[in-house]
Image (tube, rainbow, N blue to C red):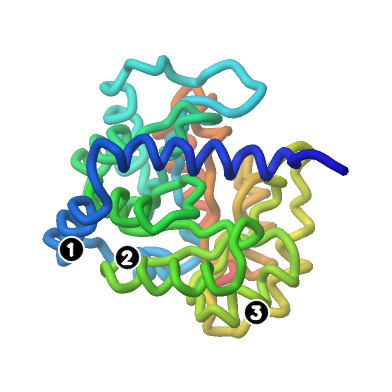
Amino acid sequence: MSGPTPVDRIVAEVLADVAARESVIPFKEIKARSREISDNTRDGVAALLRSGCSVIAEIKRAMPGRDPFLPDDELDAVVRLATEFEDGGAHLIACQTERLRFHGSLTDMQAAREAVSVPMFCRDLIIDPYQIHEARCYGADLIPLQVELLDQARLESLLDRIESLGMTAVAEVRTPAEADRAMAAGARVVAVNARPLTGGGVDKQLFSEIVPGLPESTVRIAMSGVHTPRDLLSYAGAGADAVVVGEELMSAEDPARLTRTLVAAGQHPACPSR
């Protein structure tokens, strides 16, 4: 009999972490708090559908198997990066809040959102309703749902919950079958992640394999593999409305300058646009 897979272990760790937080602030309380502030969300879809290819600049403290980009206790650096990304023209800012593998936190996201005026994309493994209400309390405007981690009923339920709070649900997929499930669940925004959840390398061809099967009205985001303007233009040529750029910006000597370069490429008249 085989043991738990790496994905199974990740899910179990996330659920245990959520249970620990819920023991401090009960679900009923976090739900009430989130609904009290559900009218101050920023329009993520409008930001994604600006002309050309939008840039989502991602703040992340660390990546599995890599040296940290930022010290765990340095909140000022998060605020500085968020400001630099907005000054560079980023249309949205993402913040990695997953604690166990990426050393992120909801506090990071809250601080980043308070420093900027663009929509905030919470980057985490969302598998429990508690996390959705919690993220809203800390300022999330867009919430990802990893389709491979959720059965169809849970996917549909979480998607509806996100939208009911005025946020935008982003269905994150890695296969055509997952994209089909996202469409069946009613997702308006789909992100194709070229990086597997565990192990393996980046496969930028996944985007061009999956996107043709999506309805024209679907907002398409490309995740992973953007290092240069050429990468952005390649994704845009395959139908991307936006790209997420994290690792390259976090390791850049001048994040604001690189953001401006990528944004300029995405807004150039030659950049494909719907």
- From the top left corner, tell me how far across and down residue 164 is, in percent: 30, 73
Q: Residues within 10 Å of mark 2 (few under 14, many from 20)?
A: many
Q: Residue furthest right?
A: 1
* Mark toward the start of the polypeptide (3 vs 2): 2
Label 2 and label 1: CA atoms lie apart by 11 Å
Look at the picture and state if 2 lies above or below 186.
above
Q: Which residue is mark 2?
A: 167
Q: Secondary structure at mark 3?
A: loop
Q: Which residue is mark 1?
A: 35
Q: Which mark is residue 77?
A: none
- From the top left corner, tell me how far across and down residue 205 is, in percent: 79, 57
- From the top left corner, tell me how far across and down residue 107 is, in percent: 28, 34
Q: Secondary structure at mark 2?
A: loop
Identify which residue is drawn at 50% across, 33% down. 249
Q: Residues within 10 Å of mark 1 (few under 14, many from 20)?
A: some
Q: Quadrant of residue 216?
A: bottom right
Q: Which residue is mark 3?
A: 214
Label 3 and label 2: CA atoms lie apart by 22 Å
Q: Residues within 10 Å of mark 3 (few under 14, many from 20)?
A: some
